[in-house]
Image (tube, grey):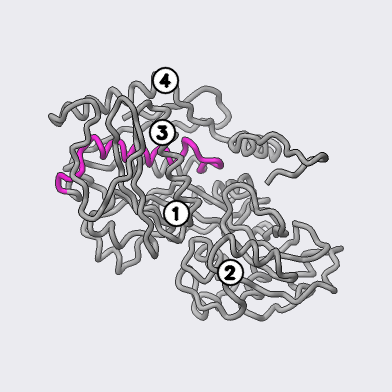
Amino acid sequence: MADVLAGGSEPPAEDPEATFARQATAAGIVLPRKRRWDPWTAAAIVVVLILVTAGLGEVTGWVNLRETPAGWSYQSQSCSGTSNVHAVGTVSAALGPAYTEWLDSVASSMAKTVGQCFDLDLATTSGDGYVPPLGATGSEFAATYALPSSSESHSIPYPLATIPVSLNAVAVIYNLPGVGSGVNLSAAALSGIYNGSVTTWNSPLIASTNPGVNLASAPALVPYHDVNTSASSAAFTGFLASANPSWAPRDGAGSPVEWPVGPGVSSDSAMVATVAATPGAIGYLEIFGTPPAGVGVANLEDRAGDFAGPSDVDTWVAAESVSNSSAVVTGNWSELSLASSPAVDSYPLAVFSYVALYTDLGIAFGGALSLTNASWLLGYVYWLTAEVSVAPLPPAYETAAVNVLNNETFDGTKIMNLENEQTEGSEGGETGEF
């Protein structure tokens, strides 16, 4: 949140992408060039989609001939001059309402840029979003924070592809009267706080990484956790387990978790409010850009022995530094951990989100999904990976996403041919083509 200037006015809001680019430049990071969509590219996409529609013998003008899956009710946005192209998605409740709003905003951005009306019908589901209703083909994609479990895989009738689309830091927040943001915490210290072995702020595990900070008179340490299944808890406990081998088998990492100590809260807003109102409290939450106001925000230790905060840039550095790991190269996202990031000033605690799709959209939906809609759906997922992200995914992750999308089929025939050219530091645009 912007600092309030003298006189009570706030400074002009800076565009989030511009903020990220400015911070990256200040940190000496050369980012891959940003893909820019021009009107000719947008027009080319529309023309190709029209040809796809005509080729199937459907009427042009973007008439949607797909049958509505049983139990679903479209809430269409108003769109003058053209019929809507719909996509039905399931969103894991663990990702939170801010994530659902982001999915909607991306759909609106794509529709505005391409000049067509594309809208979403999103349903929130408990758990990770796979089953139900994706397993019953009631949803065309699932937005989730994890790969399907082995039991879920057996319940899903067709092969799935999982595509990374966003990256957000999980901030550790606290309330220490007289102490501002920037307290340094190691994974070992956090693990100790949440397993009950570290009970005071002036514990040697905390004091040793904060020379010159007066912690002797700090209030009693009170660790708060999220009582619900959440993406932030999954990432947070995975981070704790990376520092303490006994954490996962005893308390659980991911979901569910048996928290050894501390009270729970039921939402991110409750986490911020509770920590802000409780001297000595500590908690965590996923953030979308700016950390919350009214609480301290901790720096976490990276593998290089430095400390970094939950900024978009430091989180991007962590993800970029593990781009060559087998998890990224093979797309085995369940093995991905930013805690192993070797880079200096890399923030090691974040939530990756994914979109899961059936690998053959024609076979999976048995004619209930048209090729036109399948093409728009893949275009939307592509847009999620890079077009409007505040902190764009590093190049290797985007390449992995494009490779998956290029292998999506409709009744055995590939649907798209997306280009993915990543040239660090070069000028000019980059286009994706169907």
Q: Secondary structure at mark 4?
A: helix
Kindly check if marks 3 and 1 are in contact, taking CB atoms under 8 A apart as contact.
Answer: no
- Of discs 3 and 2, which sits in the foreground? 3
Cα distance, mark 4 to mark 2? 47 Å
Residue type beneath disc 4: Pro
141, above or below 61, in the image:
below
Q: Residue at x 48, y 51 (%)?
A: 99
In the image shown, does 173 or 321 lie closer to the viewer?
173
- Of discs 3 and 1, which sits in the foreground? 3
| Mark nearer the N terminus (3 vs 2) | 3
374, above or below 170, in the image:
above
187, above or below 432, in the image:
below
The magenta-colored residue range is: 366-393
**Image mark for residue 326:** 1
- Of discs 1 and 2, which sits in the foreground? 2
Cα distance, mark 3 to mark 2? 38 Å
Cα distance, mark 3 to mark 1? 32 Å
**Image mark for residue 402:** none
Cα distance, mark 3 to mark 4? 12 Å
Question: Disc 4 designates what residue?
Answer: 39
Residue 213 in the figure: left or right of residue 287: right
Question: Disc 2 designates what residue?
Answer: 240
Residue that extends furthest to the left in the rendered view of this protein: 57
* Location of residue 106 (image quadrant): top left
| Mark nearer the N terminus (3 vs 4) | 4
- Of discs 4 and 2, which sits in the foreground? 4
| Mark nearer the N terminus (1 vs 2) | 2
Question: Disc 3 designates what residue?
Answer: 110
